[in-house]
Amino acid sequence: MADNRFTAATLFPCTARELYDWHSRPGALERLIPPWEKTWVLSRTGGIDSGGQVVMQMHAGPIPYQWQARHIENIPGTMFRDIQEHGPFARWIHTHRFTDTPDGARLEDQIDYALPGQPLLPGLSTALVNNTLERVFRYRHATLGDDIRLHQRCSRTPLRLLVSGGSGVLGSALLPLLTTGGHEVWTLVRRQPDRSKGEIYWNPERGDLNLAGLPAFDGVIHLAGDNIGEGRWTPAKKKRVIDSRVLGTGLIARTLAGLPIRPKVLLSASAVGFYGNCLDCCMREEDNAGPDFISDVCSLWEHSALPAQEAGIRTVFMRIGVVLSPRGGALNRLMATSALGFFSRFGSGEQYLSWIGINDMVAAILHALTCPTLAGPVNIAAPQPVTNSELMRILASVLRRPLLPPVPAALLKTLYGQMASEVLLGGCRVATDKLQQSGYTFRYANLEQALRHLLGKFEDNSQAGELQE
């Protein structure tokens, strides 16, 4: 059975050994899975050494299946190879080669594959596979290049870090970024912890968090909190939203303040909702909190972290915009309702959205973690906010779906009450000067470019390096 061959090759601003080391670290596979793919790593043993295995949950359209791969060859600093042991292909061999050149390190991903019943299939089947691989490796190599450049600035010294909210959409993207940079990551969990995986039990409602006897942490990243944009804001929901932020943040801040060796930095999540519904005003970190429920939540949230700040720990209140990822959050919910198209707007459509792509979000967190001059409130959002109407128009254009009639504000208020008024119909436009002046450069400052990268809807088939078939 003859194999088809697909090759993607790109130059990176590092050495071949550095590129190989990145691939050998925990989280490398997760960083390279395109976010539009419904793919999750279920289990992994042995890393990229020969005999190492990985099992992933994947989808062919709506149909789930498991892919099992095994590493069969590894020459440190030079190459490694894996094969499909169980999956949809009749044969699949993926070879990763790393070579030093005068212009940087060259990564070549070579895939030799055969389809089941290939002699009976039309050439269109192979073309569809190659087209999918082009999209996947364009994303992989672009993300890898951005990550390499980020780590060259921010990961020269490995850090021991503690993270809460690691299983959420944001945390799931952040942890692989940190580990591929060589950082040691411990996580807070609400279940029986697995100490071999660096897990630590905590229970904010009961005040349980014991860091005694553990190695000192260089930094702490606190992301945990109940999803504020989901469902009606009943009194019980509001209490969960506040308690999940105030109790958890306060417990972490007090615990860190009482340690004999304190971390140098605490990054504590907040949101641009701090400013409330701002109409078309552009809000900066020195502006006061708004009058809305979300504003009260964010004010209480940030105030709960003050014990850490008062103990001399550099504390950053990350006022995060709407994080865009097809794996969860607002973008995921919009796409789940887009079979026929996208509503042209919610209400008037004039409300502003301060958005940020998931890869810029996690990169900004690593930047804030390692930037010693960054402290206090920091707006973390793309520098080009858009209105709700612009968002829906651009999303429909990228996905080539029609625009549907708008959703009346009255209907949203009937369905979701106060949550609709503040989250769906309210808007916030923030300035990002403080973040940018600290040295952060956005990967995707333009919404259309960010969506094309996150959804794999590239405008052409060009690649950052070479694409060979």
Image: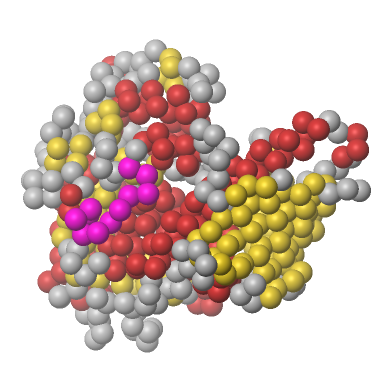
Is residue 438 in the magenta section?
yes
Q: Residue furthest top?
A: 405
* As drawn, 421 above or below 135: above
* As drawn, 50 above or below 124: below
Is residue 51 in the magenta section?
no
Q: Is residue 3 left or right of residue 394?
A: right
Residue 39 showing in the rendered view: no
Where is the C terminus found, in terms of image quarters?
top right
* As drawn, 411 above or below 388: above
Residue 439 showing in the rendered view: yes
Q: At 25% from the left edge and 80% from the top edge, which residue is drawn?
A: 262
Q: At 55% from the left edge and 40% from the top edge, which residue is drawn?
A: 462
Depth check: give the residue in front, 135 or 168: 135
Q: Is residue 280 left or right of residue 136?
A: left
The image shows residue 104 at horizontal and vertical percentages of: 51, 65
Q: Main secondary structure of the magenta part?
A: loop
Depth check: give the residue in front, 267 or 412: 267
The image shows residue 453 at horizontal and vertical percentages of: 47, 41
The image shows residue 222 at horizontal and vertical percentages of: 32, 62
Q: Is residue 195 left or right of residue 344?
A: right
Q: At 40% from the left edge and 27% from the top edge, which residue is drawn?
A: 394
- What span is colored magenta in the figure? 435-445
The image shows residue 7 at horizontal and vertical percentages of: 68, 51
